[in-house]
Amino acid sequence: MKLLLTCEHGGNEVPPAYRALFHGASDVLRGHRGWDPGAMSLFRDLEPLADAAFASTTTRLLVELNRSLHHPALFSRFTKDLPKAVRVQVLEAHYRPHREAIEATTAYWTKAKEQVMHVAVHTFTPVLDGEVRTLDIGLLYDPARAAEKRWAERWRAAMLDIDPALEVRMNRPYLGKADGLPTHLRRLHRTRYAGIELEVNQGHLRNGRFPQGLCAVIRTGLMRSLEHA
Ligand SMILES: [Zn+2]
């Protein structure tokens, strides 16, 4: 078994070549639409457990790494009207390297008959369009994939075992089967691949980081969930 760790929204950096597009947009870049605040620190915390780890720190407003090439939200309002040649350049420099490294690693392992367990680290804003999200942690998987469902249930149970006060929900605040990196990898690998998107509530952030205690619950829970996989 191999643990693959990824982070698609780890930062809000704008590559120098595209800075003019984001003139006057620093508030949007700083907010949850520009990146997943806290995701990178959580990724670093989990990284020692992983057999391979890939993170991007470029803003999702340049190109959305957690969407497929055909998805209408692949490019944001800042980039969707760029000439096609420029959008192709963006994909070549800032989309394909991350996606293809992950695809290649997954393909290499499945070919070697390893079971790939993929955790994509994300965070979510506690209030979206006026809706308050009370959950602390969401585990997103495809209900049609039994191995993913069992893994998510083990992970949730292990976290609640340590901290019963946590609100851990399945396929909230988003659905695991929606378009995303794991959905893409599921299409490529009918077997030997299980993917979970970990979503942690940004309301827990203190000075841009999640508390040690919460990180430890997530990390220990993940370790225990893999022991019996
Ligand atoms: Zn995200």
Image: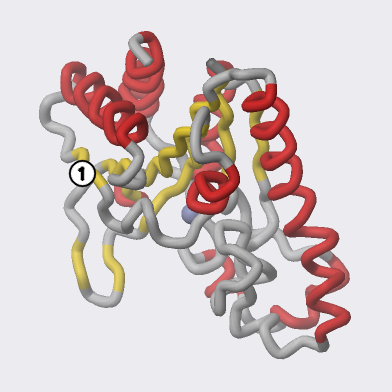
How far across and how far down the image is residue 55, in percent?
65, 41
Horizontal side of residue 71 vs 20, given as left or right:
left
The count of marks equals 1
How far across and how far down the image is residue 89, in percent?
86, 70
Horizontal side of residue 152 vs 210, given as left or right:
left
Seen from the viewer's position, the closer of residues 217 and 96 is: 96
**Three-letter amino acid code of the residue under disc 1:** Arg
Badge 1, how many Cα within 10 Å: few under 14, some, many 20+? some
**Which quadrant would residue 157 be assigned to in this image?**
top left
Res. 228 visible in picture:
yes
Res. 36 visible in picture:
no
Residue lying at the far left of the rendered structure: 165
**Which quadrant would residue 210 be assigned to in this image?**
top left
Q: Is residue 171 above or below residue 85?
A: above
Horizontal side of residue 91 vs 39, given as left or right:
right
Residue at 40% x, 16% y is: 226
How far across and how far down the image is residue 194, in percent?
45, 34
* Quadrant location of the C terminus in the rendered image: top left
For the rendered model, the colour scheme is: secondary structure
Q: Is residue 119 above or below residue 11?
A: above
Q: Which residue is mark 1?
A: 169
Asked whether mark 1 lies closer than 8 Å to ligand 1, one says: no
**Which quadrant would residue 107 be assigned to in this image?**
top right
Classify mark 1: helix, strand or loop: strand
Residue at 67% x, 84% y is: 80
Residue at 32% x, 58% y is: 174
How far across and how far down the image is residue 143, in percent?
28, 45
Residue at 56% x, 63% y is: 67
Q: Is residue 151 above or below residue 186?
A: above
